[in-house]
Amino acid sequence: MDFFANELDSLKYLVAGSLIAEDGFLHMRRVLDCHVLILVLEGTLFITQDDREFAVGAGETILLARGLEHFGTRRSEGRLSYLWAHFCTESQWQTTPPENYACHLPESFTVANTGRLRRLFDIMLDCSRREDTTAPEMTLCALKMLLLECSYQAGIEEQGISPLVREIVMWVRRNCHRRLTVADIAERFHYSPDYISALFRREMGDSLSAFLNNCRMELAKDLLSEGTVSIKEVAYSCGFSDEKYFTRVFRKTMGMTPTEYRSKGGGE
């Protein structure tokens, strides 16, 4: 099921936050008078909405729609982490596409760029915690950007990506911290490296090795922004066995060294 908004002019930010549960999380049963957008960062959220069961994994979203009952299907296994935002509009979101619409959100979909959505969530949360007069408008702008980015990325997902490539994308995102090569990925999916590489480039427009490095760079940026981990530890945590090589790749991708990125407060 997909949801379509005719307009976002009446968009209202209500509340947002994050959840981290070590084991056995079960979502409460409820019906809300607002929408809830959830982006899972780690683990799997098992949830049912309107009699449809979902297992929302890392790098996936779910939209819990206003007026529809949702509840945890079963308890999570291991660590679960996700970001969430409650919002509403004066007009109802439709489940059939109107002739013109402002925003389109699938009930659940695989995100093309998790890091980008995560940063928009962080900006929105930061703005919501400020106490100056501009905070409400800035928070609302960040929320609108978040929803429009979801709409854009959902559109990317629909552009003819095969189930195999989608599965590869999800698996690489979840395992980019490991010391992986294209050959390792090909072996995991029981195909030759040449076949996997050609298929991935044809459907995604970039090489599999470049995608792996991009996932590692997104992870590296998150770790560097925390400010408590050494550059060497960041490199190892992102699947690099050599700190100098990690620095070269990071500089080529980001236009600055990891140390410079950290000193600038996460590239801001």
Image: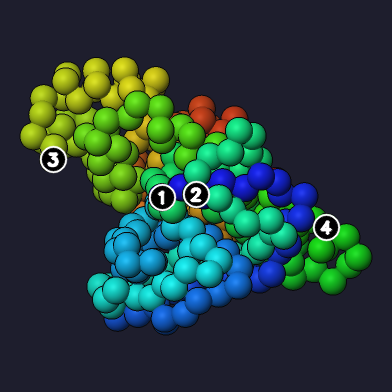
> Mark 3 or mark 4, which is nearer to you?
4
Residue at x 24%, y 18% (from the top left corner): 198
Residue, disc 2 = 95
The answer to whether 209 appears left or right of 256 in the picture is: left
Residue, disc 1 = 1
Callout 4 touching callout 2 (CB < 8 Å):
no
Whole-number angstrom distance, CA of label 2 to CA of label 3: 37 Å
Sequence-wise, the earlier of marks 1 and 2 is 1
Callout 3 touching callout 4 (CB < 8 Å):
no
Tally the numbered discs. 4
> Mark 3 or mark 1, which is nearer to you?
1
Sequence-wise, the earlier of marks 3 and 1 is 1
Judging depth in this view, the residue of 166 and 172 nearest the camera is: 166
Residue, disc 3 = 188
Judged from this view, the residue extending furthest toward the right is 133
Badge 3 local density, few (<14 within 10 Å), some, or many (20+)?
A: few
> Mark 2 or mark 3, which is nearer to you?
2
